[in-house]
Image (cartoon, rainbow, N blue to C red):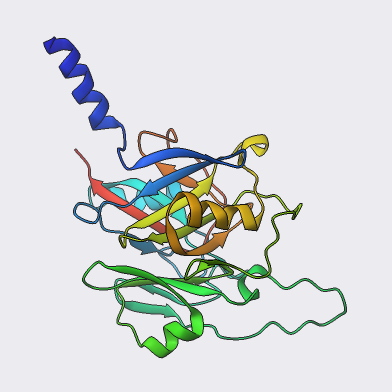
C-alpha cells in the first residue's frame, strides 16, 4: 500500500494537474489552465531586440537565474523584424504600442492578414493578477494599468459571440493557438497538437472550443501554423521550435 501511495505521489509531482488534452470536433488540443495562486504568467521577447526567440533559447536564458520552464507558448503575431505587430507589455513596460490600424488592400482579392481581421483584441494581466481580453479600441478606452499584455487578432469570441467572419464550413484548417478567460476569470491557454491529422481546425471550431467547451466568453487568437506549446510532464522535452517574437511562459525554480 505504501508503495502504491509513493508511486501515486510521484505521478502527481510530474503530471500537470491543470493541463488536459481536449478533443473538439475531431481536433486534439493541449489545454493549460493557469493556477493563479501558484503561477505567474510572464511575457518574454528575445534578449536583443529584433532577434528571434525560441523555447530552447528562453530555457537557456532562465538557467542563469536557476529557473526552468513549466509552460511556454508563442504569444502572438509579429513582423519580419521579430517585434510584435501590436501591443506588447512585459513586467509593466511597454515594448511595442497598441496598433489600431486598419489593413488597406493594395489589389482586388487580397486577403486581410489575421491580425487586422477586425475585431482584434488584447489579452492582459493586471498588477493584481486578474486577467481580461478586450477588443483593441475598448482596451484603449479602458485605460487599464497592466503588468502584461499582448495584442493579436482576430478575436475568437467577444462577450460570448463568435467572430462574425468565421464560418463553420470553412475549409481553412490549420494548427492554431490562443488564450481565453473563463467565467471565473481563469486564464486558459490552448494549442492544437502537432500531428496534422489530429491538430488542424478552422477558426469557427477553434472559437467554439473556447466558448462551448472551455466556458470562455472572451478568447483571442494568437497565431497559426508556426505555433508551439511546451507543458512540463505532458509534451516531452524542450526541443528546437519555430522562431517567435514574444513567448508567454510560466517558470519554476530548478530543484
- Up the image or down, 144 lies above or below 173; here it is below
| Residue furthest to the left | 2
- Depth check: give the residue in front, 237 or 121: 121
Q: x and y percent of residue 140 in the render?
A: 43, 87
Residue in view at x 54 percent, y 83 percent: 99
Q: Nearer the viewer, residue 80 or 112?
A: 112
Q: Taking 251 as reference, is 19 left or right?
A: right
Residue at image coords 40%, 58%: 248
Q: Nearer the viewer, residue 161 or 170?
A: 161
All told, the count of numbered labels is 0
Image quarter where the N terminus lies is: top left
Residue 250 in the image: state x and y as whole percent. Answer: 32, 53
Question: Which of the 4 quarters of the picture holds residue 124?
Answer: bottom left
Q: Quadrant of the C terminus?
A: top left
User: Percent position (x, y) of residue 225?
Assistant: 64, 52
Write the residue at 52% across / 77% down.
Answer: 86
Residue 247 in view here: no
Q: Give the farthest residue toward the right.
A: 108
| Residue 146 shows in this picture | yes
Measuring from the top left, give residue 103's x and y in whole percent.
69, 82
Q: Is residue 95 above or below residue 237?
A: below
Q: Is residue 151 above or below residue 175?
A: below
Amino acid at each position: 500500500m505504501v508503495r502504491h501511495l509513493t508511486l501515486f505521489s510521484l505521478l502527481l509531482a510530474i503530471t500537470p494537474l491543470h493541463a488536459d488534452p481536449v478533443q473538439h470536433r475531431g481536433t486534439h488540443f493541449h489545454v493549460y489552465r493557469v493556477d493563479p495562486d501558484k503561477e505567474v504568467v510572464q511575457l518574454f521577447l528575445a534578449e536583443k531586440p529584433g532577434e528571434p526567440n525560441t523555447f530552447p533559447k528562453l530555457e537557456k536564458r532562465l538557467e542563469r537565474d536557476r529557473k526552468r520552464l513549466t509552460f511556454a507558448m508563442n504569444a502572438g503575431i509579429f513582423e519580419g523584424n521579430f517585434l510584435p505587430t501590436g501591443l506588447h507589455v512585459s513586467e509593466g513596460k511597454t515594448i511595442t504600442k497598441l496598433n489600431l490600424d486598419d489593413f488597406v488592400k493594395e489589389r482586388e482579392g487580397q486577403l486581410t492578414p489575421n491580425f487586422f481581421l477586425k475585431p482584434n483584441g488584447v489579452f492582459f494581466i493586471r498588477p493584481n493578477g486578474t486577467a481580461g481580453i478586450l477588443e483593441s479600441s475598448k482596451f484603449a478606452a479602458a485605460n487599464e494599468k497592466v503588468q502584461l499584455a499582448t495584442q493579436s487578432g482576430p478575436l475568437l469570441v467577444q462577450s460570448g459571440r463568435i467572430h462574425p467572419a468565421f464560418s463553420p464550413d470553412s475549409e481553412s484548417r490549420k494548427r492554431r493557438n490562443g488564450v481565453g478567460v473563463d467565467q471565473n476569470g481563469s486564464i486558459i491557454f490552448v494549442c492544437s497538437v502537432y500531428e496534422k491529422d489530429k491538430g488542424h481546425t478552422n477558426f469557427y471550431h477553434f472559437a467554439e472550443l473556447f466558448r462551448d467547451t472551455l466556458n470562455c466568453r472572451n478568447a483571442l487568437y494568437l497565431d497559426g501554423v508556426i505555433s508551439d506549446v511546451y507543458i512540463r510532464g505532458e509534451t516531452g522535452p524542450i526541443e528546437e521550435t519555430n522562431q517567435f517574437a514574444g513567448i508567454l511562459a510560466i517558470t519554476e525554480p530548478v530543484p
